[in-house]
Image: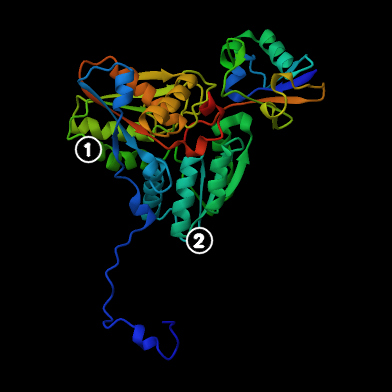
Amino acid sequence: MIATRDNLTDLRPHSFAAPRLDTTRPEDLIGNTPLLRLDRAAAAFALSTRVTLLAKAEWVNPGGSVKDRAARHIIHEAERRGLLRPGMTLLDATSGNTGIAYAMLGAARGYRVKLAVPENVSPERLAILRAYGAELVLTDPLDGSDGAILEARRIAAADPTVYYADQYNNPANWQAHYLTTAEEIWRQTDGTISHFVAGLGTSGTFTGVTRRLRELNSAVACVSAQPDSPFNGLEGWKHMATAIVPGIYDAALADGNVTVRTEEAHAMARFLARHEGILVGVSAAAAVVAALSVARELDEGVVVTVLPDSGYKYLSERFWLE
Amino acid sequence: MTTIRIPTPLRPYTGGNSAVAVSGATVGEALADLTRLHPQLRPHLYDGEELRSFVNVYLNKEDVRGLQGAQTAVAAADTLMIIPSIAGG
């Protein structure tokens, strides 16, 4: 029956009590990501049968990456401290994923979002940022993400109406992982994690997870991973020796460091897609290379790494076809 | 001579220069001249005789892979750019 002014009363619910809707907000979907077993990778790389290789599937976050965790906590902390208020613009430099997280959360919370982004960021990421309505300041691709950082600093110095989130120097970045990622890993492994391995970008994931895991069990070994060279294709990772070093990075924290060559990560991305059925981005594949290099040395243990995002934002890259 | 613009992470291997003037009639010849002038660049750009898969070379803002690759003709007024990937965050 079509509702008209005459028969509308027939369609009204009999009770005016508020309905009990089962709903949520996008930001409440951040975190509590699945922990995946990488058994085929473990077998293919001849790990001991007493070594388990596990990985956090961070692409299930609503913004599609691990960066949702840091962006949410950065925004909440800035609001709590009165640094970010209605009508203000959130500003940061980003290689893409943090920007997507800011753009998503900013849209939902009513903030304008302005991002300094290297011009050569993948076209998929640019399209997503624009779809969320973020304002983009494209920086010289020759200067990479350090050029975007310098541009964000310049904008922040010139415009007091922006809140410069500064993910590279904001402790809320690593605290997000201290409060959530580490706790999830501890719970999901029933406290059996023996090794944690993560790539370094802002270093927020590694720093926060390591600090909390050490409190839970001081014997957990934590290994950070970096590109093998300042010129590399590991988008999202940083070569600390030659880049602007994030203020939140603590070089003394890691029990060990491994390096990954870009071509190894590309090969691993193809392996994971074709043999595990897991389509991940380049930094996730690099994290698995790093985790395997740690796991190969073990007779027994539970090795956990973090897969920052899926492969969907990298499908225009040529290496998938090799 | 053609100019090749060098990204920040590779400048330690070009004596700190952000641009290098090279000779050559094609992209391949220009890059060969670049690595002849600055041999330390070669392992960062090449895997054997092939450019590493993530190394993007742009001719006047166009990816040379969309043109004729290493065979793409270059003129003295042209600018080539070697574009890095994007780090961290």
Residue B3 horizontal/vertical position (percent): 75, 21
Q: Is residue A262 visible?
A: yes
- Label 2 secondary element: loop
Frontmost residue, A138 versus A66: A66
Q: Name the residue rendered at 65%, 22% in the picture.
A: B6
Drawn side of residue B36 relative to residue A310, left or right: right
The amino acid on which the numbered mark 2 sits, given as a three-letter code, is: Gly
The amino acid on which the numbered mark 1 sits, given as a three-letter code, is: Gln
- Disc 2: CA contacts within 10 A as few (<14), some (14-19) or many (>=20): few
* Residue B46, picture quadrant: top right
Q: Which scheme is used to colour this image of the protein?
A: rainbow
Same-chain check, marks 1 and 2? yes
Residue that numbered label 1 is attached to: A188
Q: Residue furthest front?
A: A1
- Disc 1: CA contacts within 10 A as few (<14), some (14-19) or many (>=20): some
Frontmost residue, A112 versus A269: A269
Which of the marked residues, 1 or 2, is nearer the chain's N terminus?
A: 2
Q: Is residue A95 visible?
A: no
Frontmost residue, A34 versus A9: A9
| Circle on res. A87 | 2
Q: Nearer the viewer, mark 1 or mark 2?
A: 1
Q: Name the residue rendered at 68%, 8% in the picture.
A: B36
Drawn side of residue B7 relative to residue A14, left or right: right
Q: Chain of mark 2?
A: A
- Label 1 secondary element: helix
Residue A63 horizontal/vertical position (percent): 43, 47
* Residue B33, picture quadrant: top right
Say above or below: A261 vs A123.
Answer: above
* Residue A321, picture quadrant: top right
Q: Chain of mark 1?
A: A
Say above or below: A219 vs A110.
Answer: above
Say above or below: A36 vs B7.
Answer: below
